[in-house]
């Protein structure tokens, strides 16, 4: 269901389990609820980065519009749920993101922490892009195919932006070496996670 070319383009080491889309469309209310909160958390993450590192002028300039875009995505998911007579459920524990945060290096300088945060954001966006692509191609609802194609394009841009910001502010070899570690860790993490249709990740 997933193509090696897409995974390679995003640098991901493991494609999503082919069963995921089928499980996701069994209860659209669940997957749309989780998607909505993912967009909300993405906006919050960008705000936190801006607040924590205001002296990084390009970071502030680049992330400010992303905050607006991600919040717009949150509203778009809510609108889609309204059209379908679905209600936003409660936010759930995000095992995927928590797993990535557990791999984040503890201690280190303020700058080291920024690099870690940027790489985690990049990885979340890359995996989101891959999953939105799967939904845009394989979900049975044609309207949702178009809906998720737009998200796929947006997440691809965000993934590239976070990687570029990390490489701008830090030694590229250091960034790429740590990025490779994150990619390997994420693949191993997914192998051990239950495939759930009520989660975007």
Image (spheres, grey):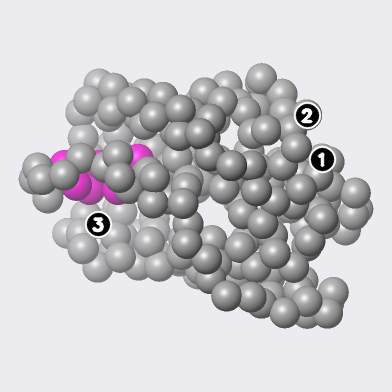
Local secondary structure at mark 3: helix
Q: Is residue 173 above or below residue 163?
A: above
Q: Is residue 11 magenta?
A: no
Q: Which residue is mark 2?
A: 1
> Does the residue at mark 1 contact the one at mark 2 (Cβ under 8 Å)?
yes
Instruction: Pick whichever of labels 3 and 1 is earlier in the sequence.
Output: 3
Decide if residue 137 is on the left or right side of residue 169: right
Q: Nearer the viewer, residue 172 or 101?
A: 101
Q: CA distance from mark 3 to mark 1?
A: 38 Å
> Does the residue at mark 3 contact the one at mark 1 (Cβ under 8 Å)?
no
Local secondary structure at mark 2: loop
Decide if residue 34 is on the left or right side of residue 121: right
Instruction: Pick whichever of labels 1 and 2 is earlier in the sequence.
Output: 2
Decide if residue 149 is on the left or right side of residue 178: right
**Residue at the image point whose x is 30% and y is 52% from the top:** 58
Instruction: Pick whichever of labels 3 and 2 is earlier in the sequence.
Output: 2
The N terminus lies in which quarter of the figure?
A: top right
Q: Which residue is mark 3?
A: 57
**Residue at the image point whose x is 61% and y is 67% from the top:** 36
Q: Could you say which quadrant of the image residue 107 lies in?
A: top left
Q: Please provide percent x and percent y for residue 27.
A: 79, 61
Local secondary structure at mark 1: helix
Mark closer to the observer (3, 1): 1
**Magenta stretch bounds:** 112-119
Whether residue 185 is visible to the viewer of this picture, yes or no, is yes
């Amino acid at each position: 269901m997933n193509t090696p070319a897409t995974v390679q383009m995003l640098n991901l080491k493991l494609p999503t389990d082919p069963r995921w889309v089928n499980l996701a469309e069994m209860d659209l209310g669940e997957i749309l609820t989780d998607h909505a909160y993912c967009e909300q958390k993405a906006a919050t993450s960008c705000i936190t980065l801006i607040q924590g590192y205001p002296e990084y002028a390009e970071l502030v300039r680049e992330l400010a519009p992303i905050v607006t875009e991600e919040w717009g995505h949150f509203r778009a998911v809510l609108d889609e749920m309204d059209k379908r007579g679905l209600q936003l459920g409660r936010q759930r524990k995000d095992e995927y993101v928590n797993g990535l945060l557990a791999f984040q290096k503890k201690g280190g300088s303020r700058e080291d922490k920024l690099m870690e945060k940027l790489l985690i954001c990049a990885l979340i966006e890359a995996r989101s892009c891959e999953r939105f692509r799967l939904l845009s191609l394989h979900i049975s609802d044609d309207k949702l195919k178009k809906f998720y194609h737009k998200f796929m394009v947006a997440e691809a841009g965000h993934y590239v932006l976070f990687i570029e910001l990390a490489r701008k502010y830090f030694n590229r070899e250091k960034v790429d070496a740590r990025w490779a570690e994150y990619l390997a860790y994420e693949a191993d993490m997914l192998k051990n996670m239950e495939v759930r249709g009520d989660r975007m990740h």
